[in-house]
Amino acid sequence: MSKVNLTVRPFRMGTEKEAALKPLEEASEVRAAWQEVDGCGSPEQCSERCEVLNVCDARVEFADEIADCIQACCNLADRYGIDLTAAMGRCEERNRKRGRYQ
């Protein structure tokens, strides 16, 4: 199992309602980007540029959308003074109890 360590610098934009809606918007963009990646990897699905650079543009876009979603969630948590480190610890414990880790 891999572990992800991130440093995210929250910032404030818009109203509280806009901040609360932003993760939903970003999650929708993650799904749309995933649809472009799903099935990608076969030569006929990747552009010539992807093959030359050995990088799939769709996967880069997918990764960027995931990062945007994480940023929006961190911004929202920061706005409300939520300790995400503690919340992630509780999340991991719940997932451990559900047998989701090997």
Image (cartoon, rainbow, N blue to C red):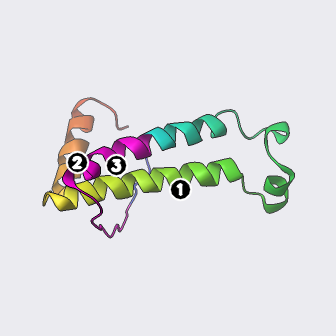
The residue at which mark 1 appears reads as: 64
Disc with the residue nearer the chain's start (2 vs 1)? 2
Question: In the picture provided, is 45 more to the left or to the right than 37?
Answer: right
Q: Secondary structure at mark 3?
A: helix
Q: Quadrant of residue 44?
A: top right
Residue under pointer 3: 22
The type of residue carrying mark 3 is: Lys
Are the two marked residues, 3 and 2, in contact with CB atoms closer than 8 angstroms? no
Give the residue displayed 40% in from the left and 43% down from the top: 25
Question: Which of the labelled discs sits on residue 97, or is there none?
Answer: none
As drawn, the label of residue 17 is 2
Where disc 1 sits, the SS reads: helix
* Left or right, 68 with reference to 82: right
Q: Residue 13 at x, y = what percent?
A: 30, 63
Residue 48: x and y, percent?
A: 86, 52
Q: Is residue 63 visible?
A: yes
Q: Residue at x 27, y 36 (%)?
A: 95
Front of the two marks 2 and 1: 2
Q: Is residue 18 magenta?
A: yes
Amino acid marked by disc 2: Lys
Check disc 1: other Cα within 10 Å, few if <14, some if 14-19, many if 20+: some
- Three-letter amino acid code at disc 1? Asp
Front residue of this view, candidates 78 and 97: 78
User: 38 or 3, which is in the foreground?
Assistant: 38
| Residue extent of the magenta highlight | 5-27
In this rendering, the label closer to the viewer, 3 or 2: 2
Percent coordinates x, y for residue 46 in the rendering: 79, 44
